[in-house]
Amino acid sequence: MADTPEKRVKRAVEAMLKSMGVYYFFPPANGYGRSGIPDIICCVNGYFVAIECKAGGNKPTPLQIREIENIRLAGGVAVVTNENNYELLREVLGSIMKRKPHGEET
């Protein structure tokens, strides 16, 4: 398999998630699932987090934008990241980790 710029972004995000102790998985892109699902699905401190990885100036497709909006409407967090904004992703994840665990009252 070729090493593409997007694969490098995914590997860098995966390394970040591992270093932060975040549960994550890559949904299979085998044609049986729904189109537009983000590249990485995480559970961070009880919160649903989805990460769409892009490289260079690439932007999410209309289907990806629809899924990101639906995740946000459902109360989840959805982030688009690339090689230029890893620190922003780290800040978002860190902020979620500092919240009270999802489901805890008061």
Image (tube, rainbow, N blue to C red):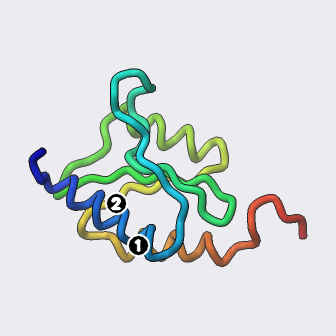
Residue at 29% in and 67% down: 12
Asked if 9 appears above or below 2 in the picture, the reply is below
Residue at 75% in and 61% down: 102
Q: How far from the left and from the top, in percent, is residue 64?
A: 39, 38
The alpha-carbon separation of the residues under discs 1 and 2 comes to 8 Å
Occupied quadrant, residue 49: bottom right
Asked if 80 appears above or below 17 in the picture, the reply is above
* Front-lying residue, 57 or 52: 52
Can you name the residue that lies furthest to the left here? Answer: 2
Residue at 61% in and 50% down: 76
Q: How far from the left and from the top, in percent, is residue 8?
A: 20, 60
Q: Which residue position holds label 2?
A: 81
**Residue type pointed to by label 2:** Thr
Indicate which disc residue 88 carries.
1
Which quadrant is home to the C terminus?
Answer: bottom right
Occupied quadrant, residue 57: bottom left
Q: How far from the left and from the top, in percent, is residue 75?
A: 66, 49
Asked if 63 appears above or below 10 in the picture, the reply is above
Locate residue 74 relative to residue 77 in the image: left or right. right
- How crowded is the residue under tag 2: few (<14 C-alpha within 10 Å), some, or many (20+)? many
Which numbered disc flags the more N-terminal residue, 1 or 2? 2
Which quadrant is home to the N terminus?
Answer: top left
**Residue type pointed to by label 1:** Leu
Q: How far from the left and from the top, in percent, is residue 24?
A: 50, 56
* Front-lying residue, 29 or 69: 29
Locate residue 54 relative to residue 39 in the image: left or right. left
Occupied quadrant, residue 73: top right
Residue at 21% in and 53% down: 6
Whether the residues at callouts 1 and 2 have beta carbons within 8 Å, the answer is yes
